[in-house]
Every structure is written in C-alpha cells, then in structure tokens.
Amino acid sequence: MADSLVKMRNITKNFPGVLALDEVDFTLRPGEIHAVMGENGAGKSTLVKVLTGAEEFESGEIYLNDASTPIVNRSPQEAQQRGISTVYQEVNLCGNLSVAENLFLGRQPRRFGMVNWQQMNRQARAVLRGIGLDINVEKPLSGYSIAVQQMIAIGRAIDISAKVLILDEPTSSLNEQEVVRLFELMQKLQAGGMGIVFITHFLDQVYQICDQITVLRNGALVGQYAVADMPRRDLVAAMLGRTFDDLATIERRPSAVAKKAGVPVVSAKQLGVAQGVKPFDLDINQGEVVGLAGLLGSGRTEVARVIFGADIPETGSLEVKGQPARPNPLASMQAGMAFCPEDRKAEGCILELSVQDNIILAEQTKRGAFHLIPKSEQDKIARKYVELLQIKVPSLDTPVKQLSGGNQQKVILARWLATNPDLLILDEPTRGIDVGTKTEIQRLCVELADDGMAVLFISSEIDEMLRSCDRIGIMRDLKKVGELVGSEMSTAAIMSKIAGDDFQEGELNA
Amino acid sequence: MPSALSRVVKSRLFFALVCLGLVLALDVVVFAITNQQNFFKIELSPANTLTGPLMQILYWAPELVILAMGMTLVASCSAGADISVGSVMVLSGAVGIKILGGNNIENFKVEEYAVPLVLAFGAFIAVGALCGVWNGFLVAKLKVQPMVATLILFIGARAAAKVVTGGTILRVEPKSFRWLGNYITDSEGNNIFPVPTQVFVAIVVVAATALVLRFTALGTNIQSVGINAKASKIMGIRSDRTIWLAFVFCGVCAGIAGIIMTSKISSIDSQWGARMIELDAILAVALGGNSLAGGKFSLAGSVVGAITIQALKTGLLTAGVRAEQMPFYQAIVVVIIVIIQSPELRPMASRTLARMRKFSGKKVVKS
Amino acid sequence: MNSDSKNRPQDFRVADLNKGFFGGVFAKFYGNNLLVLITFAMLVLIYSAASFIFRDQNFGSLNSIFSMLHSWPHLVVIAAGMTMVLISGGIDISVGGQCAMYCMMFAYFMQEDGWNVNSYVMIAVVLATGLVFGFAQGVLVAYFKIQPFIVTLAGMFFARGLTAIISEKTIGIKNEDFLGLAAVKFTLPFGGYTDGGGVYQAPYIYLYAILALLGVVVLYIVMTWTGFGRSVYAVGGSEQSAMLMGLNPKRIVLQVFVIQGLMTAFGSFLFCLSLPGGAVEKAVAFEMNAIAAAVIGGALLTGGVGNILGSLAGTLIQLTILKIITSVGTLSSGWGPISTAAMMAFFIAMQSVLTSGRRKRK
C-alpha cells in the first residue's frame, strides 16, 4: 500500500487582494481520518477546492499515491476520476430523483441503449447495503433526511472507486444518533484503507474520530499534529493564533462603568432555535460590552440572530427593557436594537447603492417609508458618521461596492449607529479588515458603552475581546457553556472554556 | 476630468440617450428618403394642432411612457417583468366603457354616459389596480416567478375583455371621451390646444411617480430589495410588501394607459387593442439602461427608453414596415440588448479571443 | 432505516405500492407525483360530468374523444415538449408564435401560383427551421445565461413578426399531397354510437392525431429511459449538483431547447394538417395552453418534476373544457382562455403551497 494517498506541497493561491493559501503542505495517508481545522478565512475550504479542482492554484505540487509526477485537477470530475470525491454539507445530489438514480446518474446501467431501471435499482440496493443502509432506492431522495442523503452521497463516491473522501462539514445539520451512524461508516471505510478528510468545527468530534489534524490560519499552515498528542487547548490556541505562554499584558479596558441598576436592555431566558443554538440565558445591561467567544460554528452568530429576531426562536423568552420582544427585525429595531451581521456582502451592504443611502436605510425604515428623512438631514447624518468613523470615501454618492472591506464595514456600522440604538450587536465586525480600522472599531465599542449603550460583541480574536469586553460568554458546539467576568477573563481561561478542557479531560483519556 | 467623463459615459441615462440619438438619426434618414420630410420640422396645422414627425412620436408615446414607469419598478424589485400590462389595459378599457355606457349601450355604441366620465376613468384605474393586486399576490406571497404569474392575466385578462365586450368593438360617441387621448375640443369640434392631452397625462404620471419616490423612501426600498433581499430583511424592509406594491403600481399604470388608448380611438377592441405592447414596455426599461435582472433603476432612463421605442416604431412604419411585422424588429433589438447586458458576454468574448489568438499562434508555428 | 420515515409525514406513498412488475410500472407512471394523480382524477371527473350533462352529444363515444384530438393535435405534442422544458427548469412562451410561423410557411410556400414547394420538402424545411429556432433560443438561455422567459418572449415576437413578413393574408392550403396526408384516417370497428337517425357512427382517427400521440410516447420514452432524459431531470432538480455529478448542464439545456423547437415544428405541422392554412393570428395565446397543460399535468414551474404523460392528461382536460364551452353554445369564445388561465392559477397556487411546505420542512 502506498505511503501517502495525497501529498500537497507548497500550495499557494491568491484571491484578488488576499493570499488565500501561502505555501501550504498537506499529507493524507491511507486508513486515516484527517481533520482540517481553522477559523473563517483560514483557507481550509480553499485547500480542499484546490485539491478537488474546483479552484486553480498558482504554485505548488499535488502528488497522488506517492507518484513522482505531480497532477493537476482541472475540475471536480477529473478529481473524481482520480479517486477524490467530496461530500458537502448541503448534499450535492438531486432531491427530485430517486435514490438509485442519484447513485448512478451519468453512468446508468443500460440495456439496448435504454436505462435499465431494474438492474440500476438492484445495484443501488447492493451499494447501499455495503455501507449499512437498507432503504427503498426507488423513492425520491428528498424524502430522506439529510443524514441518509449524505450517506447516499458517500455511497456514490465509494462506488465511483473513491480512495480519498472529503467530508465538508457533514455533521452540522445532523442530530446525535445520525452523527454516530456517520462515524460508524467512516470508521468502516477507514478500516478498508480509505483516506478521509474531515472538515468540521466541532472539537468533540475531532477528538472522537480523527487521527491527524492539520491546522490553518490566515492562509498559512500552523502545523500538522497527531490527535493523541494534541491537548484540546493547544489546538484552540493553534487555531486562534495564540499560545498560553503569550500572556503579555493586554491593555484591558479600564474598569467597566458601574452598572446602572435597573432592567437589563436585553434579557434572554432559555432562548433556543430549532436545529440551531440550544437554549441559553443572557442578560445585557446598559453601558456594558458583552463578548461572545467561541469557534466558528459554535453558535455565536445564531445567538445574535435570534436576539435580533432575524431567526424565530423555538423555546424560551426574550425581553427588551422589560417588555416581551416580537421576533422580527423591524420590531427589534424599534425596540432599540441594531445588528451588524457577520457576512458583510450577503447581509450587510446594498452594494450598488450610495454610501449615503446605505447609511440612512435602517433609520429610514425605522421611521417608516412614508416619513422620509429630509435630504438635508440625511446629508447631515451621513456626514456625521463618515466623519466620526473616519470612513474614507470620495463622496457620499459613491456606490458602496467601490469601497474597501474596512470602509464597507464602517458604513454598516454607521448605518446602525444612525438608528441611535440601545443595544448594538456586532458580529465579527473586525473580520478581514486592516489593523488600524480594527483598533478604531474596538475603541468605538468601548466609547459607546461608556456613553450608556449596551454592546454585544462577537469575535474570533480573543485579544480584542479582552480589550473591549466587560463580560464574555463562551459558546461551544451550539451551547452557551459559561460566562467569564472581570478578573476571570484571560486568554487561557477563554481558550480552556472554548476547548471544553475543564470537564472533559477524563473523557479524553478514556 | 477623465473620471467625470467616464462617470457620465457609464451612467444609465447616457446609454439611453445614445440609443435615442441613434434612433433619431435613423428617423431623420428615413423621413428624408421616404417622405422627403424634415424630421425636426413642427408646424401649426389649420386644424390648430402641431404636426410633424416629432409630434407624431409624442402623440403615440405616452401610453408606453406610463407603462414603462410601472415596469421599471417591477423589474427593479422582482428581477422579472409584468407581461400582463397590455391585456390589463384592454380589460380596464372594456370594463370602464361598459360602466360608462351602462344601459345606454346600443349596437355596441355608447351614445350617452350612464355615469360621470370621472367615475368611469376611476373604474379603469381600479381594474388595473385589482389586476396588480392579483399579480402581486402571486409573486410576493406565493413566490411564483413574476413572468409566469403575470402570464395568467396576459392571456386571461384579454379573454375576459372579450367576454365583457361580447367579442366586438365597443364605441363611445360623445366627443368629451376623446379629450384625454387626443386634443381638447370646444363644442364645435375645434381644437382648443395644439398639443395632445395624453402628453400631459404622461407628464403628470411621471412627475407623480418621481415625486412619490422623491418624498418617500419607497424608491430606495425597492432598489434595496432588488439588490439584496437578505440585507433588506435584516434592516426590517419587508420584501413581500415592497414587491406587491410595485405590481399594484404597475397595474394602476396599465389602467391609466388603458384610458389613453381607448380615448385615442374612442373604442375598445379586445382583440387588437394594446397588442404586444408588453414587450415594448420591457424594452423601454432595458433601453433606459436598467437591468432586467433587478437592482438600481432610473425613471428618466425609462422615459427616454419609451420615447426611443416609439421613435423607432414611427421610423419603421414610415419606412414601410407594417404594424404586424413590427414585433420581428423589436425582438431583434431586445435580443441585442439582453446579450449586451449579459454578464456572460465579457468572459465569453475574452475566451473566444484567447482561443483565436492561440489558433493563429499555432498557424504561425506550423508555417 | 426507520428513523427517517417519521420526518416526512406529507410524503406521498405511491412508491410503497411498487411491488412486482405492474407495481413498478405504476410507480414510474406516476413518478411519485401527487399532482399527476389529481390531474387524472380531474380528467375522469370532468369528462364523466360532461358526458352526463351533455348526454345527447355522445361524449361517451370514442368519436367524441377522437374529435378532441382532431381539433388540437398540436397541443398534445407541444405540451409534451413544454413539460420537458419545464422539467429542465426553463420555460418557452414562443410556441404560439412559432406555430403561426410554421403554418404560414406551409401555406405560403406551397401555394401553386407561388413557390409551389413539394409538400414533403416543406415538411423537412419546417422541421429544420424548428431545430434552428430551438438552437438559437437554447444558446441564448444556456450560454448567455439570459432568463428563458425573456429569450422566448423575444422569440414569440420574432416569430409572429416574421409570420407577418412572410404574408399578412390568410392563406389556405390547396397542395394535394398535403391534403391527402391530412385526410388519412383509420376507422375503428367499436366504440361508436348510434345517431338520432338510427345510423351507427363508427369512430375514426386521423393519421395526424396518431402521430401526435406517437410524439408524446417517443418523448416519454426519451425522458424516462435514456441517459439524456434523466439528465434533464437532474439539471432541473439542481444544476449545480448535476454539474458536480459530471453532467454538462449547459449542453443539456441547449439540447432541451433544440428538441423543443423540433417538437413545436412537428406539432405545428400536425396542426396544419388538421386545419390547413396560415394566418398571422393563428395559435394566439397558445403558449398559455401548452404551459397550462404541462402544469396541470404535474410539471413544477421550479423545475425537476414533471411527467410527459401527465401533460397528455392536462391537454385532454383543457380540450374537454373547450368542448363543454362549445357544447353550451351560448358562451363567448373568451371563456376558453379564461378557463385555462383560471385552471393554471389554481395549479400554480397549489404547487406553491406544496413546495413551500416542503421548503419549510427542510
């Protein structure tokens, strides 16, 4: 058997303005389940796309099966022919076709040039039995749960003689039993000598099933580790880019403003979303910056969305200044909330509209479409925030799409500040923007809180949370697992909490 | 200076004006050759009307300008089009005249008004609005693709008009009915004012639309929904209501256009009235530099686009193209515009160029 | 695997019936599609009601059923093609305009005092024109990524305008070969009725009606038992998935439009046989009938789901309703399109409710 199935060496890839992969190495051996981990923008999906031919790369080599000549996959099909198959979180099969068809689409068994349905169904049953799935293959795929669909996708990959299987966040939408089933299947395939690349955000699952971990950060390789030799908190540290020795003085926010007594601005009790974040409690007081720390996919964004009413809660209650809240964005805005979403492009900017329109929009909607803010006032508001946030724009009429990422972020921030909120929710406000702007935004948070605003601050960077937050809630695997206040807050404490070391040490050794 | 210039060149209105210029140039040639007529000459005729090729265009363009207003907003927020406008015009005309005539309809002629004229015109608009409500319901609430949703009335409304009129042409005799779609006359039938009234109706509709958009946030909301519905939702903008509103407005525009159409010829013809005008309206929006895939819009562009279409049609008619043949040429213009707007065009062109270069390069090596 | 079954209470269980050979055919025939079943039930219901109400008009006889096919053979064929286009995720509203154009081509170019083209040559020319028309529309949709609605709306205007450019007159067809072909009919020894005079009226079916049904069957076979047909379903279900599974969606969409062009030309040829002649106003609003037939037959406007045989049921429902309208005798011809539009609205609303329910479950 070959020593390695896939060997990627010095892979470099640029996106316009961003170095997505910087001389990254990656090695996958037969019979290995290999986790690829990293925060947003770390480059893990780009790495996989380069391997499967979905993206081109500029330099570096990919070797298969210890071969001496490098290969380049130009398309996912080509990669598939070389034995590399991918199964995505949103299953890339056709829900309207039967299970059997999905397994054999494009390579149906024929008789007299016609699709032989009976033989196809027979073969399909055999393939699925091989992976422990006994279902009616003539039903449409969409009738089955995501878990089964994923296993069918894996079945298809195996049947096209895959040697390398890439599972891209397969467990995000599965329940616990389904995850167990998937893991059983993965272990079975592993025993058969297949190499599996497993992309996930769930630390528990990595420690449960993986042998090796490759950690990426900001497009660079941090390292490849054997799971057994890698304590959880070291893994978290590697992903977040800090070590435990690195406790150099972080300029802590000068002691928080004494909490003004009275009702909290927002008070969530056992608030939870179906198939989303598990029920949690959270109070945010006036003049307080509350942080939410956790890895990508840990549920921190979901907390923000459900508080703002962008997602409908399934359980629990939410009170805003003592009043029960209605779960829709407009009502939340009128109750004094503001929400800068994580994905600037998809949920924030109206790219083709001008800077001024983008800044005014939220306040305008809050007042109602028929109560137009007078042009002069619009101008004043826009100017005020452009100045306050030092947004660099040629003019207020410039379309937002012509601005840099940092300035776009500031425009969205300006939009929400213009609504004079009591609670400002910032979901990763500093992602992908330059250091100077980052510092400005952190400082702004603190200033706003000093003026009495409540701020919910979500970030992957622990430093900036330590600098700006009074209190930090910790999220892990869609659960809120704790809260750190004042002197409890330290890089080490946060990472331990995120990693879940505190109570799972025993489990690890077992 | 270069940046200012490039901004002007890139603006929607510039595209629209260039198209208008090209068409007018074509018209000048056509009128010079076929009629030996100066295209730009406007005279006061003995009947106290302004005549000339340009006035001819102004006489026919208003319906299209009005329809283009509604279509612009629909295209902006729903990334589709309302293809039922022509049929809705006819239906509103049929119902309106039926109400106007009441029991006084004899031999398919309305000799005397049964209800005040204003009320009948109100009925035109109400029918249009109701059709818009229906279209908007399908698109905004049931999430049907706009063009499939409006296909129902595209066929259904015209057929309903046929049922209402009994399949014949209904005529309106009293002269005052003609005022909104022609020249205003005194009791002896002399023209009082030399410019056709519908021009002013169009100006009023355009001005009202522009003012409403200027003094409310609706325009921004419509664009915002069309560009990024997800972000709009986060900001509390209800995309379903916005889209619905645009369709109702489009229906109202069709009702007003229906008034002008029926008034112009003092009759309603459910079969031939407003035929194929929906493509004209869509074309006007596209020629105005607006994307049919939604997003930013320019009302002024659409107005210019509508006038361009009418100028093109007038030119083609003068050149001897028959009305029934017109769609052929319009279709070609549409295809050219959508190809130009297609985001696939540029990469495709560069790929082809690269391939050609490669090909010629090989040739060189061979030789 | 039992855990998944509880997740889908609304799942239609026709597939559970598919035991044994007939069961298999049954399952395939209905394609797990509730809408198709509703359509067939509706067809039977409407037709039975009509035969009851118009007892004196022999609705129950084969003569009556054939006469429906004789009146609109083109709808049978083109609705099937439309179903294929809808399955692929597109739409084609140019069919009415194309139909007028092809009929006009037959009528104009076969005139004895004009071009006097041989009828068989003309048939070939029309079919070839259909291919080219479909190809042009397909390229614009698949490779330029222009909305199929816009493309085919332009196609509709193009074809109608071109019809008028060929001729604005209403031209009849006098070509003997052609009329001979139109007159070929087969009489059946059963299924007729005895008329008021006590004379037995044997049912007969024209060749063009048989050709129309044949066209549907062929397309059904293509869509059900060939790799291409299944790929069309896949592309309509999810273009991206189809691509990741190694198909070429662009080429498949292009092929769909080419075949649809051919089907439209073929259907128009049959129409011309049943009603020889060309006019600019021929087949006005016909696109609606074709789309309605497909939609009533269970094709989802969102693509991926549809049944060619279902479109036949959709066609027959429409023809039955048209027959009822003419049977009543006093109704305006406007009621035909209105009833079609109303039915389409009903089915679109139902689809929307069904699919949004499915969306929410996810």
Image: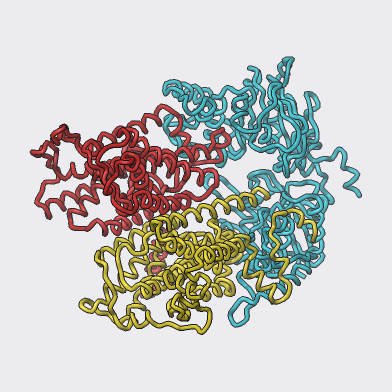
Q: Is residue C259 visible?
A: no
Indicate the position of residue B50 as horizontal and vertical percent values. 14, 38
Occupied quadrant, residue C39: bottom right
| Figure colour of chain A | cyan
Query: Can I make out residue B110 in this image?
Result: yes
* Residue C135 rendering spot, x and y as whole percentages: 41, 67
> Residue at point 29% right, 73% down?
C107
x and y, in percent, of residue C223 in the image: 55, 71
Q: Residue at x 80, y 65 (%)?
A: A132
Which image quarter is the N terminus of chain B in? top left
Question: Chain letter for yellow?
Answer: C
In the rendering, at what x and y percent does residue C326 appear? Answer: 42, 63
At horizontal 51% and vertical 74% (from top left) the residue drawn is C61
- In this rendering, the answer to whether C20 lies above or below C154 is below
- Return the residue nearer the eye: C62 or B202: C62
Q: Residue at x 42, y 69 (%)?
A: C72
Q: Which of the chains is red?
A: B
